[in-house]
Image (spheres, grey):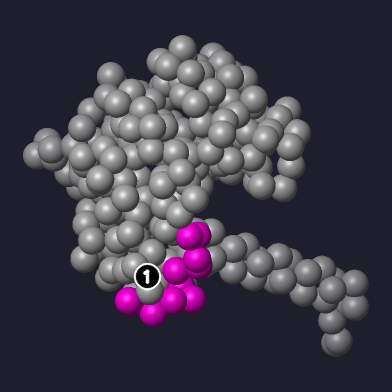
Amino acid sequence: MPENAPAARVRRTAAAALAAVAALALTLAGCGTQTVSPASARADAGGDGKGRYGSVDCAKSKCIALTFDAGPAKDTPRLLDILKEEKVPATFFLLGKNHVLAHPDTVRRIADEGHEVANHTWSHRILTDLDPAEIREELSRTQDAITKITGDEPTLMRPPQGRTNGDVTDVSRELGLSQVLWSATAKDYSTTDSALIERRILDDASADGIILLHDIYDGTVPAVPGIIEKLKKRGFTFVTVPQLFAPAVPKPGEVYRP
């Protein structure tokens, strides 16, 4: 008996939706690339890890990591004021060209105030579109620029748009960089509505989560106080990305995602 037409359409629609979800997952994690969660990294480290704990053990507490991409920019000093007032550590994935070079004092302040300074490439080129030499240049130029300012070489990187592959992984491993993706994003590049940015983050926040925001957009920094206040009320403790994984130490080349 031929299949009922409406039922067939429903099945085709469901299949298309599942395919879209799968495609999105591959886009975020890199085609064929395995990701490691904070919980599994902590479990693998056992009691022998040498990772940096914050004020809490994230295996026992409800931790979340606040991260900012593509700065520093004009609003970053105000963001640092907010984080200092709220006693919240964060992780900053910095762009080299036109950002690190343009705001060396802010980069130095980020490091001096106890935040994690990380690499977001030199010019935000999509790394999966590049050959290994070009990937190496995008990452190493930012490594050198940050190290010259802070005295410390970053150990974390975030690939633009979360796109990674075997070449990106190999170069990251060579440069001593772990790859860090995310679990919650406000898509703040598409709106200046601070209330919407706040709501999107609150809707997706979860234990062991990594929040992705951009301190280069006008609506983002004004949303941060509300995000911090409401997540604290929900019992979350803010940590840097390395603290989220302690006692594990993120391994160079590995791709981490909650």
Q: What amino acid is at disc 1?
A: Ile
Answer with the quarter of the image where residue 149 lies.
Answer: top left
| In front of the other: 107 or 239 | 107
Residue 130 colored in magenta in the image? yes
User: As displayed, is residue 208 above or below residue 250?
Assistant: above
Residue 24 colored in magenta in the image? no
User: As displayed, is residue 196 above or below residue 118?
Assistant: above
Answer with the quarter of the image where residue 207 lies.
Answer: top left
Query: Quick one: which residue is furthest to the left in this view?
Result: 48
Name the quarter where the N terminus is drawn. Answer: bottom right
Residue segment shown in magenta: 123-133
| Residue name at image x 71 percent, y 65 percent | 17
Whole-percent x, y for residue 28 in the image: 51, 60
| Residue name at image x 49 percent, y 26 percent | 77
User: As displayed, is residue 28 above or below residue 44?
Assistant: below
| Residue name at image x 48 percent, y 60 percent | 123
Query: Quick one: which residue is furthest to the front in this view?
Result: 102
Whole-percent x, y for residue 121 in the image: 41, 57
User: As displayed, is residue 127 above or below residue 68?
Assistant: below
| Label 1: how many Cα within 10 Å (few below 14, some 14–19, many 20+) | many
Residue 108 seen from this side: yes
Whole-percent x, y for residue 198 in the image: 66, 29
| Residue name at image x 50 percent, y 60 percent | 124
SS under mark 1: helix
| In front of the other: 112 or 225 | 112
Whole-percent x, y for residue 163 in the image: 48, 64
Residue matched to label 1: 135
As drawn, is 150 to the left or to the right of 184?
Answer: left
Query: Quick one: which residue is furthest to the bottom in this view?
Result: 1
Residue 240 seen from this side: no
As drawn, is 38 to the left or to the right of 233?
Answer: left
